[in-house]
Amino acid sequence: MPKTTIHTLREKMKKGERMTYLTAYDYPFALLEQKAGIDVILVGDSIGMVVYGYDSTLPVTVDLMMPHVKAVRMAAPDVYLVGDMPYMSYQPSVRDAIINGGRFMAEAGCDCVKLEGGREMAATIRAMVDATIPVMAHIGLTPQSAAQLGGYKAQGRDIETAKKLVEDAKILEEAGACSILLEAVPSEVAEIITRRSSVPTFGIGAGPHCHGQVLVIHDMIGMFDRKVAKFVKKYAEVGAKIVEALEEFKREVLAGKFPAPEHCYPMPDDVAAELNRLFPD
């Protein structure tokens, strides 16, 4: 497949073609997503929860993410690759944002970086874009701010917060954001933002009106036996299938059924006989 760029995404947007966007955190999953023709891959700070077992995204660092982003880039050279900037890698200062964002671009080969926040991030986004770092804005439910928001709750469900989201999206677009991710907002809000936007919008729990749809890969294929967000559709139950395979493996080993002769390397009879002569019981 040809390399997907921001121009590819904008052309799809203009033509009304819907786009697909999934997370990946390692080489095998990224390889599968490229084979499936997924448009955009995010190496998200959700890695902290789905790969490392943390109870939030906050412990994730740029150093932790770098090897994962590099592996995804190697597996999926043709997708549009987004590096998720972890907590406190961009909030303290514009300088921090540019240095850490630059690492995602230069070291890991990202096509853009993603950061969370509304109008308060406009100056940071403008400075990063001026420094040649493309930025995807992320508004609505912003997990890095969950404590401030009062938990992992849908946003924009009253007129004041909905109005602010619509305004924030336009402010961030004008600051230079190349695309906007909307998380856990009513579809009516996402529809207005998308209608007013001149850049691609991607929704995760934001209804059907965004230009593209996002899911966390581990959630949508059922890798974990845990409660998932309302907006998640499970397309498979891979976790249950893996457990079945592991249990069957254990049964066969305990019963002496594995390895069977077809899983063993043969030796000529004369060589085996000579070996047993040399090393008798």
Image (cartoon, rainbow, N blue to C red):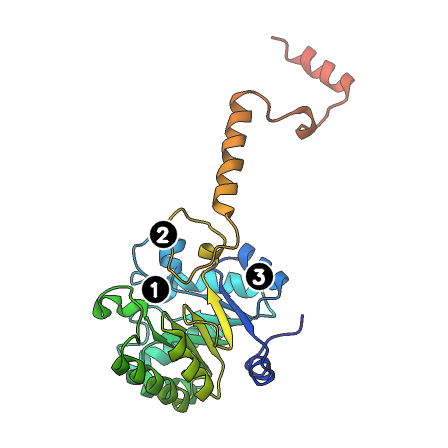
Query: Based on the displayed image, in which of its 4 quarters is residue 151 positioned?
Result: bottom left
Relative side of 27 to 118, left or right:
right
Q: Quadrant of residue 12?
A: bottom right
Quick check: 275 above or below 41? Answer: above
Tag 1 residue: 61
**Within-10-Å neighbours for mark 2: few <14, some 14–19, many 20+:** few
* Three-letter amino acid code at the position of disc 2: Lys
Quadrant that contains the C terminus? top right
Q: CA distance from mark 2 to mark 1?
A: 25 Å
The answer to whether marks 1 and 3 mark residues whose Cβ atoms lie closer than 8 Å is no
What residue is disc 3 on?
A: 33
Judge whether residue 3 can be spotted in this image. yes
User: Distance of mark 3 from mark 2, alpha carbons?
Assistant: 24 Å
Of the residues under marks 2 and 1, which one precedes in the sequence? 1
- Which image quarter is the N terminus in? bottom right
| Of the image marks 3 and 2, the number of the one nearer the N terminus | 3
Crowding at dot 3, Cα within 10 Å, few <14 / some 14-19 / many 20+, comes out as many
Q: What amino acid is at disc 3?
A: Glu
SS for callout 1: loop
| Residue at the top extreme of this rendering | 281
Q: CA distance from mark 1 to mark 3?
A: 24 Å
Q: Position of residue 96 (x, y in %)?
A: 32, 78
Residue drawn at point x = 66 percent, y = 30 percent: 263
On residue 227, the disc is 2
Label 3 vs label 2, nearer the camera: 2
Judge by depth and name the residue closer to the eye, 173 or 132: 173
* Foreground disc of the pair 1, 3: 3
Mark 1, Cα crowd under 10 Å, few <14 / some 14-19 / many 20+, is some
In this view, the residue in front, 277 or 234, is 234
Q: Nearer the viewer, mark 2 or mark 1?
A: 2
- Check whether the beta carbons of the residues at disc 3 and disc 2 lie within 8 A of each other: no
